[in-house]
Amino acid sequence: MKKSVCLGVIVAMTIVVAGQRAAAQTVPASGGPVDPALIEDLVAASHILAQEGVLDAFGHVSVRHPNNPVRYLMSRSVAPALMTADDVIEYDLDSNPVSANGRASFLERFIHGEIYKVRPDVNAIVHSHSPTVIPFSVSQVPLQAMFTNAGFLVAGVPVFEIRKVAGMTNLLVSNKMIGKGLAETLGDKPVALMRGHGDVVVGASIPIVTYRAIYTEINARMQLQAIGIGGPITFLAKEEGEKIDAVNNDPKNPSGGIMRPWELWKKKVMEK
Amino acid sequence: MKKSVCLGVIVAMTIVVAGQRAAAQTVPASGGPVDPALIEDLVAASHILAQEGVLDAFGHVSVRHPNNPVRYLMSRSVAPALMTADDVIEYDLDSNPVSANGRASFLERFIHGEIYKVRPDVNAIVHSHSPTVIPFSVSQVPLQAMFTNAGFLVAGVPVFEIRKVAGMTNLLVSNKMIGKGLAETLGDKPVALMRGHGDVVVGASIPIVTYRAIYTEINARMQLQAIGIGGPITFLAKEEGEKIDAVNNDPKNPSGGIMRPWELWKKKVMEK
Amino acid sequence: MKKSVCLGVIVAMTIVVAGQRAAAQTVPASGGPVDPALIEDLVAASHILAQEGVLDAFGHVSVRHPNNPVRYLMSRSVAPALMTADDVIEYDLDSNPVSANGRASFLERFIHGEIYKVRPDVNAIVHSHSPTVIPFSVSQVPLQAMFTNAGFLVAGVPVFEIRKVAGMTNLLVSNKMIGKGLAETLGDKPVALMRGHGDVVVGASIPIVTYRAIYTEINARMQLQAIGIGGPITFLAKEEGEKIDAVNNDPKNPSGGIMRPWELWKKKVMEK
Amino acid sequence: MKKSVCLGVIVAMTIVVAGQRAAAQTVPASGGPVDPALIEDLVAASHILAQEGVLDAFGHVSVRHPNNPVRYLMSRSVAPALMTADDVIEYDLDSNPVSANGRASFLERFIHGEIYKVRPDVNAIVHSHSPTVIPFSVSQVPLQAMFTNAGFLVAGVPVFEIRKVAGMTNLLVSNKMIGKGLAETLGDKPVALMRGHGDVVVGASIPIVTYRAIYTEINARMQLQAIGIGGPITFLAKEEGEKIDAVNNDPKNPSGGIMRPWELWKKKVMEK
């Protein structure tokens, strides 16, 4: 039973080296083969987030290369619901493909590279058009932590206004400069909204970032409903949210925290 | 492998000519056979829009005849979810069937004919009872572009008030005069709401118009939610929306734009 | 191929007559066998309304006996989604079972009997806990016609307050007196809300009443959303709604009106 | 056909006694084997509540031991949708496992034990993150009975503020002290909300508590909608709700009350 996969990368590089010697020199070196279980999780996360309505035909999930912190792995440009292990491309942190092997990259991959550069604690990133989060991105009302499952939101949820870094654009994070601006807005937080566009969610692992992306959407729905009920809302206190987040990410009690929903979600998409 | 289908039209005309010589003279000539892939897309669009909740048992999608700009193709009167390739009828721009072959036409086909007459840029049209769009059609609050995927809405979304052209009616666009009024309200825009009834969405191709119809509905949901959150809403600027629309319809980058969701949606309805 | 079914009624009566001669004399006579297609439609309507979220595990659909206007047919007490042809019981207009054959009747069958008594134009009735209709039943804001498909609502939608006829109750229409009060509130309208309980919808046929029950729910959702958008709402004018209703129930154009959704809905539940 | 199951408990105790004599002395005695139909209902309730959107990957259902009122049965720590009969663990009322047999217990099992201690009328408990209930838990607006199916809510719906008993926590009911505080807030009511967390619902049987948990969620949706409509809301009167609750739980008319939806829901999850 093989323990790692090479992402079609080595093969691709060989072809490139043989055919275009000069160009090949600028292709970044691969971080090396990766445990197929990690790729399986990357694919599962894409399918889960599509299934749960966080990702539409757009958006993407990435994971930092486990053996080389200046590389990350992400799907080629394809609807997340349709992604397979064969779609994975490796990138350097400037978001150059180590080898696209002729496959189209997501225009907005710079979201991922620029955040990995400045957030060593982050190993996985989701960018989505999370439908109930977007209304908060164009509003003056901050998204705030409503309940236990969204405890991570007590860190605060900044909103990225692309006009401040790039003026009037197509709103896409289509280069390093805009990606850097987004990473600065995110700061040390787990989630940043992108005005009129969606959000970016980060975490220490694929299960954590999947959990956070889903509960950011659910929290937005609940906050919208609480506003509809009227009157003051008792949000989670900072201390409460931090204590919850510690439980959810407690490696000594994986079944009590975020691994429980992860396993349920993964089972559901694997059975489809 | 055959490259075109004749829509049952030629056969029908023969029958008509043989049996009713006088009547046959008023049947418009067919634009000729059509690539079956286009018919497949027309059927797929009907199924997709039903699947995504934009079309109920009513509503319809049409496409301009690719070889004759004064003809268009549309389903016979049947629920869009049940439409098959055999249901396609060809019409002239006065919405006379080239050959209905005994099949009932949609009462509201004049929506399509009258818009094709005055919008040479339009090759596909959707009329729907899009559920979250209708509340905006009876309100004074204009539908506005909330986010990237609905960038096309920055052109503005007029509302057609049928009372202005036809007084108290059953609200159906059941003749050319009302269809012409709707086309005038639409002007050069991609979407017009129809008060107390639904909307009409136009575009250069079936995938584009399907994309626009779905994201008009999603934008309406998001705008409703943003109003619920309260306070001012930062809508897309005109320049932002126009730049997004250019990316979405960039023929050089089909996988980055509207073809990505189209392929996902089509795959889902084909598998059912 | 048999043309009619006898609803298990004849068999049941025989047993009763043999075993309990005195009691048998009070069992009303049957209206006679019924076309199985009508029973199929009654079952289909139950399944459709459950599928579309109008009926939960409660609620019921009835049809007037086609050969005897003082009899009606309705399911025994079972969740509508589980109903089969074998569950049909015949009742007289006082809602006595012609033969329950040991099967439990719905407590609220008096809704049906009392309305059939005073509405000769009505051949089918739905009672439901239609979820978005109930909030209007406990509000001062009248449900009003928002769009074409709900044109029938221009007749006005009265609200039945059971306290006025029976004081503090369990809110169930559990006898003829309360049923009569509900029928009076309904008057000549197609729909009446029942405060804190649900609604009753009537029509000339099973397809019509099914259509009306579904679009009453959808209209409630749209009106709630339009209120959320804010500002004045342009409801359908009375004349508009009446003209739409005429089209929808035009026997000369069945595929343009309510038969189109009926066939779609029926096909969906038959395939399950 | 066997009439009872021993929950893996006897086997587990043997192992414990053999291997760890001292520790074994503190393991509470089992209440004995249980009718497998009860375990089937416990599993069904978990699946039903997941299916109906009341339980996410968290939350749990318990049942009091039918032969020993100071024992209760609950799933090991696993997502409710995935629970099987093999996952059942027996607990004493201090929420010590009679035998976990190496399986992880829910951190919040103290909710159950502490309520069973003080509520002899209660034989089944649900703790959930019921999504539309949570916004009411962080609001000043009390959840109130909107309609017949939620008649049990006329008893009043208190909100448990964990800060009052335990200060700044992770909001989990992770010990007996907090569980006791929650039980005190619940008092003699069927439902208590837990601020920023979820709710707890109690009843005399698994079908009743399942019914109540589902209709608490539906009632919350309806109340939110009625607030959105605007103006005063006519809630159920106390007398009305009490009379409805009596019908729903009438053992002489099981098919008219909560057993009808229970059987529908159970059939749906059994068929999956």
Image: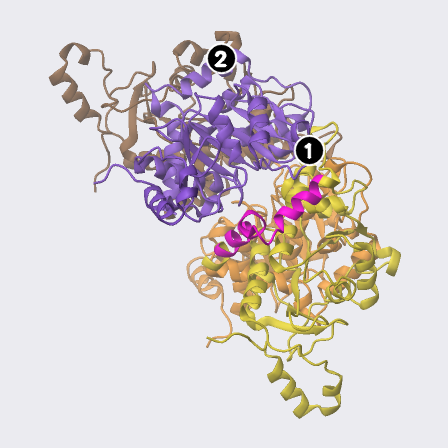
Chain colours: A orange, B brown, C purple, D yellow
**Mark 2 highlights which residue?**
B184
Q: Which residues are magenta?
A: D240-267
Indicate the quadrant containing the N terminus of chain C: top left, top right, bottom left or bottom right.
Answer: top left
- For the image, the number of numbered tags is 2
Badge 1: few (under 14), some or many (20 or more) residues near its Cα, within 10 Å?
A: many
Give percent across and percent down for residue B265. 44, 43
Q: Residue C170 vs residue A81: left or right?
A: right
Which residue sits at x=56%, y=45%? Answer: A107
Badge 2 amino acid? Glu
Q: Nearer the viewer, mark 2 or mark 1?
A: 1
Please give the chain letter of the residue carrying mark 1: D
Give percent across and percent down for residue C51. 47, 42
Badge 1 amino acid? Ala
Q: Main SS type for the magenta part?
A: helix
Residue that sits furthest to the front in the current view:
C22
Q: Is residue A73 above or below residue B45?
A: below
Proximity of marks 2 and 1: CB atoms separated by less than 8 Å:
no
A175 falls in the magenta region: no
Q: Residue A5 vs residue D128: left or right?
A: left
Give percent across and percent down for residue B9. 22, 25
Q: Is residue B189 above or below residue B168?
A: below
For mark 2, give the secondary structure. helix
User: Where is residue B152, by image quadrant?
Assistant: top right
Residue D226 - label = 1
Which residue sits at x=49%, y=61%? Answer: A270
Q: Can residue A221 be seen?
A: no
Q: Is residue B50 above or below residue A120?
A: above
Residue A238 - label = none
